[in-house]
Amino acid sequence: MTDPNQHVFDADTLTDEMRPLRRAALALGSNLGDRLDYLQAAVDAITESPGIFPVAVSSVYETEPVGTRTDQPQFLNAVLILDTSLPPRSLFERCKAAEDAFGRSRKEPKGPRTLDLDLLAVGDYTINDPDLIVPHPQFSERAFVLIPWAEVDPDFEVPGHGRVGDILDAATDEHEVRRLDEVAIELPD
């Protein structure tokens, strides 16, 4: 998969400004309720937004929780690749709005959640704000992100890191990531 043609533009429907399309990657996760339905609903909500054009979605993977709270249900994870004319901040806000719409609780940041959407990378942007860091600061340490991302876009060039496929080859995360062949997330027509 290659980056979108940088000479392709999308017209902003509110301002009529022309904006270049950038390739972006989002990590999707859920470990509460009907996990697969939450992931599908997130893909539907995000891809229905103006300025977002779905490219690919990975297989669904089941993983153990990582980090400080491992005493919670297993996650379903996937990665969504899209082309967008939105700036990273707008895409990030749409992800947060989707999480909120599907009941994401922020009382316990590392606790169980109906939906977890992480903005992994957007084109060649690098951002280091208190609430938004792009590329995502921990993506290269997480097999549950790298494996599905490499499945759908191994050639994605992450600023300051290199190709996703190469990053996966060098990863040392030993958490089990199991692909679920019997389920899938569908992109809209």
Image (cartoon, rainbow, N blue to C red):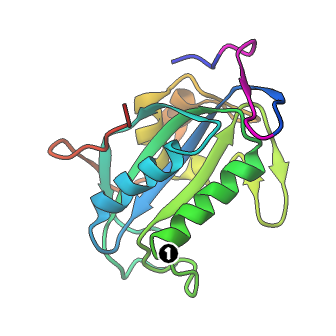
Q: Is residue 30 magenta?
A: no
Residue at the location (45% across, 68% down)? 66
Is there any visible trace of residue 175 in the rendered image?
Answer: no
Q: Is residue 8 magenta?
A: yes
Determine crowd level at label 1: few under 14, some 14-19, many 20+ residues with C-alpha closer than 10 A: some
All told, the count of numbered labels is 1
Position of the C terminus by quadrant: top left
Residue at the location (67% across, 13% down)? 5
* Quarter of the rendering containing residue 106: bottom right
- Give residue 88's position: percent from left, percent from top: 74, 46
- Give residue 131's position: percent from left, percent from top: 77, 66
> Could you say which is closer to the camera, residue 167 or residue 183?
183
Is there any visible trace of residue 45 in the rendered image?
Answer: yes
Most extreme residue toward the bottom is: 107
> What's the amino acid at mark 1?
Arg
Q: Is residue 136 above or below residue 103?
A: above
Q: Main secondary structure of the magenta part?
A: loop
Instruction: Tell me which segment is drawn in magenta.
Output: 5-14
Provide the secondary structure element on which disc 1 rests.
loop
Q: Is residue 12 left or right of residue 62?
A: right
* Quarter of the rendering containing residue 122: top right
Q: Is residue 91 above or below residue 124?
A: below
- Residue highlighted by disc 1: 104
- Give residue 103's position: percent from left, percent from top: 46, 76
